Amino acid sequence: MDYLRVRKVGEKRGVTGCMVTYYCEAERIPGAVKKCSLWLIPADA
């Protein structure tokens, strides 16, 4: 499975990286996984 970082997802969705991080923490992006301090988001999410 391919994963994207917060910045790439933000660019793709037209929001800031902070908002993507908020969505990950609120479990609004299915399949998002936190590894240490890095969020990994599935490319198809």
Image (tube, rainbow, N blue to C red):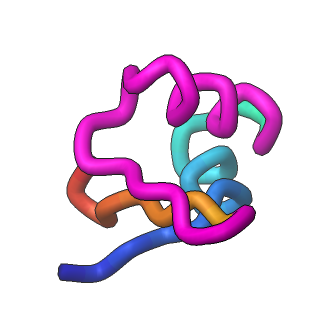
Residue at 25% from the left image edge and 48% from the top image edge: 31
Q: Which is more toward the observer, 12 or 22?
A: 22
Asked if residue 20 lies in the magenta stretch, the reply is yes
Residue 37, by quadrant, is bottom right
The one nearer the camera, 42 or 26, is 26
Asked if residue 21 is among those painted magenta in the image, a careful observer would answer yes
Q: Is 13 situated above or below 19?
A: below
Q: Nearer the viewer, residue 24 or 9?
A: 24
Name the quadrant of the N terminus: bottom left
Placement of 41 over or under 26, stated as above or below: below
In the rendered image, the residue lying farthest to the front is 36
- Residue at the outermost bottom position: 2
Corner quadrant of residue 20: top right
Please provide the residue range marked out in magenta: 17-37
Q: Is residue 2 above or below residue 35?
A: below
Percent position of residue 33, x then y: 41, 56
Residue under the point 55% across and 69% down? 35
- Residue at horizontal 32 percent and vertical 65 percent from the top: 43
Left or right relative to 4: residue 43: left
For the point 40% across and 25% down, which residue is it? 27
Q: Residue 24: image x %, image y %?
A: 52, 35
Q: Looking at the rendering, which quadrant does residue 18 occupy?
A: top right
Q: Position of residue 7 (x, y in %)?
A: 72, 59
Locate residue 45 relative to residue 19 in the image: left or right: left
Q: Say whether residue 19 is left or right of residue 30.
A: right
Q: Position of residue 13 (x, y in %)?
A: 54, 38
